[in-house]
Image: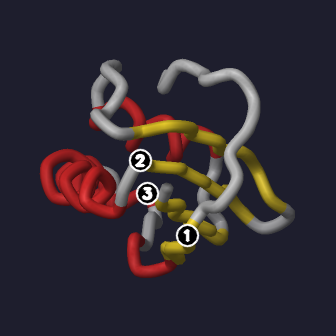
């Protein structure tokens, strides 16, 4: 498993939803879990993938385009941090 966490200071839910719209409604291949929500100073996204390759494919094929389209909203992809996920539990949830 491979996890990616991104903190986006000053990003609002509306700005996050803008990126979501550009990603499309279908669940990316290899995505195990997607968690997103507000923090004290912005927005946080945590994704767990089956593998780093699955994440990199999603990043190059969909995320970079969607983030570019929403860049005016203040998104900064360089603030993402990756980690190896050892435990993922709970029911699988839909992407949207």
Label 1: which secondary element: strand
Residue 21: give x, y in percent of width and height: 36, 30
| Image vertical order of residue 5 relative to residue 54, above or below | below
Q: How would you rate the neighbour count of disc 1 (Cα within 10 Å): few for under 14, some for 14-19, many for 20 or more?
A: few
Q: Residue at x 25, y 49 (%)?
A: 58
- Residue under numbered circle 2: 50
Foreground mark, 3 or 1, reads 1
Report the front residue among 40 and 26: 26
Residue 31: give x, y in percent of width and height: 42, 39
The reply to whether the C-beta atoms of the residues labelled 3 and 1 are less than 8 Å apart is no
- Residue under numbered circle 3: 73
Q: Residue at x 64, y 50 (%)?
A: 12
Q: Earlier in the sequence, mark 1 or mark 2?
A: 2
Report the front residue among 72 and 4: 4
Q: Residue at x 41, y 80 (%)?
A: 78
Label 2: which secondary element: loop
The reply to whether the C-beta atoms of the residues labelled 3 and 2 are less than 8 Å apart is no
Instruction: Specify whether 36 is left or right of 27.
Output: right
Q: Which label is found at residue 14?
A: none
Q: Which label is found at residue 84?
A: 1
| Image vertical order of residue 6 relative to residue 94, above or below | below
Instruction: Specify whether 9 is left or right of 62.
Output: right
Label 3: which secondary element: helix
Residue at the extreme front: 86
| Image vertical order of residue 2 relative to residue 15, above or below | below
Q: CA distance from mark 3 to mark 1?
A: 29 Å
The reply to whether the C-beta atoms of the residues labelled 1 and 2 are less than 8 Å apart is no
Residue at the extreme right: 40
Q: Residue at x 51, y 63 (%)?
A: 4
């Amino acid at each position: 498993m491979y996890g990616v966490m991104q903190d986006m200071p000053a990003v609002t839910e509306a700005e996050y939803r803008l990126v979501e719209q550009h990603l499309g409604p279908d669940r990316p291949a290899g995505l195990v879990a997607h968690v997103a929500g507000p923090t004290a100073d912005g927005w946080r996204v945590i994704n767990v993938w089956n593998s780093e390759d699955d994440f990199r494919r999603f990043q190059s094929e969909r995320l970079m385009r969607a983030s570019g389209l929403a860049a005016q909203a203040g998104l900064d992809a360089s603030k993402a941090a990756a980690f190896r996920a050892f435990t993922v539990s709970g029911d699988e949830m839909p992407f949207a």
